Image: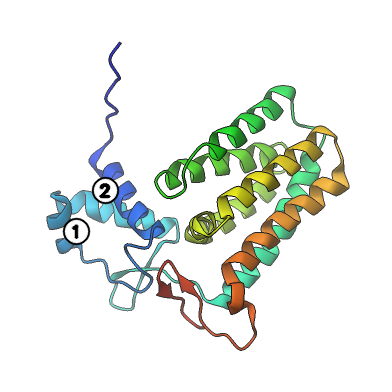
Amino acid sequence: MKDAIEYKPLTQSVFERLRGEILHGKLKPGELLRQEQITLRLGVSRTPVREAIQRLQMEGLITLNPRRKAVVAALPIRKIREIYDIRARLEAFAAELAVGRLSEKELHKLAELIRQMEALDPQTELEKILDKNRDFHYIIYSAAGNDTLVSMIDQLWRDILRLRSQYLLSPHGHDDSTREHLKILEALREADRRLVYDLVQQHCEHSKLTLLGDEASPRTQSLPVDGGVAEVR
């Protein structure tokens, strides 16, 4: 049996290409995205490039400067701290609410996602890991039964999409994430609400500290993000 060829709309292909270049640091924070250059480089028309840039802006990876030019977004350290501090509490709360609500089928799916992520190489299969990581967390948070809470978490995830990529690409980041996911799953199976809350909060806090590193010092004013320097605001 032959493998089927996956068809993707041109806009989707351009979006995934540019998104991957941003996540891997080939397009750096503050870099101007010139549509004419992108169309020539990718061999496409302006329309799919323009639509792809609009989608990247919705994900928070692209911002528009005062002249309405698209540039790769950067995050100030202060905002990174704020987002991760809020994320730790919201996600821990959502996971705590999910305790006892997850079916055996969902728990099995969580275990399977961990197994799949562990087998992937973040250097070459980052997008797949990101997708499965999102699936893992959202199976848990969706079980909380609080759509408003999940919507708030979703917005935070869009704000830190690139940072989650950087964490997974950091030394031991992928392995640490796998171990933490396994502990969270075990606590969910044991229906230990307090432990689930603590483990998810620690999971978020570990990501923040890994990303900031020496930049956690109050005297530091900018954070390298995928090879660039975050803005100070």
Q: Which residue is mark 1?
A: 38
Q: Residues within 10 Å of mark 1 (few under 14, many from 20)?
A: some
Please indicate whether residue 41 sits to the left or right of residue 54 in the image.
left
Q: Vertical placement of 3 versus 83: above or below?
A: above
Q: Residue furthest top?
A: 1
Please indicate whether residue 146 sits to the left or right of residue 2 in the image.
right
Quadrant assignment for the N terminus: top left
Element type at mark 2: helix
In contact (CB < 8 Å): disc 1 and disc 2: yes
Q: Which residue is mark 2?
A: 14
Q: How far from the left and from the top, in percent, is residue 69?
A: 28, 71
The image quadrant that residue 157 belongs to is: bottom right
The answer to which of 220 and 171 lies nearer the viewer is 171
* Residue 97 visible at all: yes
The answer to which of 216 and 89 lies nearer the viewer is 216
Q: For marks 1 and 2, give the CA distance.
A: 9 Å
Element type at mark 1: helix
Q: Vertical placement of 201 versus 110: above or below?
A: below
Q: Vertical placement of 21 versus 127: above or below?
A: below
Q: How far from the left and from the top, in percent, is residue 183?
A: 75, 43
Q: How far from the left and from the top, in percent, is residue 197?
A: 80, 50
Residue, x 63% and y 54% (percent of image)?
Answer: 152
Mark positioned earlier in the residue sequence (1 or 2): 2
